[in-house]
Image: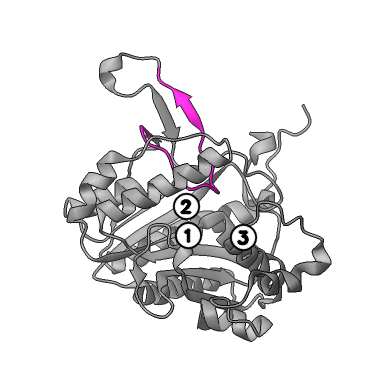
Amino acid sequence: MKDWKPTANIRALRLRAELYALVRRFFAERKVLEVETPVLSSAGNTDPNIESFALQFDGARSAGEATRWLRTSPEFPLKRLLAAGVGDCYELGRVFRNGEAGKRHNPDFTMLEWYRVGFDHHQLMDETAELIKAALALAGRRATVRDTSFRQLYQDSFGLDVFTAPEEDLRSPLGVYGIDPAGLTRDDWLDLLMTHLIQPTIPSNRILLVYDYPASQCALARIREGEPPVAERFEAFLGPLELANGYHELKDPGLQRQRFESDLARRRERNAALPALDERLLASLGKLPDCAGVALGMDRLMMALLGTDRIADVLAFPFDRA
């Protein structure tokens, strides 16, 4: 075997260690508690766009369900801790997503996820920008910050009101790519506009914060009623790289169950795996404090710090060398 060597150089490995130390200082100064939660769970992620790894436990049945899912995020157990009264908390650890391998993706990667009690998505958005700026300083870099609503971003970029424009108007700017429209929804076209036309134009020294997404893209966020209603979530970009996704967290267990069931219905249509619902999470949501949470991809942040578009450059051993 000739591919035994790491793909990241020593500078990248040292910068990662410095970044992790910075993260821990950042949260220690803010009295946000570091915690650890299970990597294997009896429940999986129902999101139709994320695939989990499933494993079989061969021990005694009394230990619990035999089918276990590698976590795609520590979100559910972190919320159970919040519901139990732990207060502001974060976890820095490995997560796993099946099928996600390529130039910018690795099936196992490092995620930083944290929750702030009493915050809404705007307050957490500002804190996320502070952390990204502190990380950039490690590499001797600075960035400007721009925040904009989802609606305003698409208006500025395409002259479209994405909440009212017909779907064919959303498709039109993407015509040059010859995308097969079969099976694509309105939200899919909005995502393609972002990934193909907006993200590539974000300057490398710009932190772009986009908030108040269409209600159809709420995931685990609250929906704020209005004309139109919007999901109280945000995404953070550094240059063309999407780094973070955050929510003003939904606390209604009945509504969250409806969203999970809707996810499973879409997965059935696609003949995808049907993970068990996280009943422990649903049981805890009624006690969840008012809070906001965000997940940030550390490997993506490392890529931005080093100015590379190859995730292999920031990993000691990517999937094909693991």
Label number found at residue 188: 3
- Tell me, yes or no, if residue 144 can be seen here: no
Q: Which mark is nearer the camera, 3 or 2?
A: 3
Q: Nearer the viewer, residue 222 or 294?
A: 222
* Residue shown at the point (48%, 48%) measured from the top left: 47
- Tell me, yes or no, if residue 17 can be seen here: yes
Q: Which mark is nearer the camera, 3 or 1?
A: 3
Give, as a single range, the part of the protein colored magenta.
41-57
Asked if residue 10 lies left or right of residue 22, the reply is right
Which amino acid, mark 1?
Leu
On the image, numbered disc 1 is attached to which residue? 296
Residue 162 location in percent, x, y? 58, 76
On the image, numbered disc 2 is attached to which residue? 111
Kindly state the secondary structure of the residue where label 2 is placed: strand
* Cα distance in 3D space between marks 3 and 2: 24 Å
Residue 71 location in percent, x, y? 44, 40
**Quarter of the rendering containing residue 199:** bottom right
- Of labels 2 and 1, earlier in sequence is 2
Which amino acid, mark 2?
Met
Would residue 122 be counted in the magenta stretch? no
Residue 322 location in percent, x, y? 63, 33
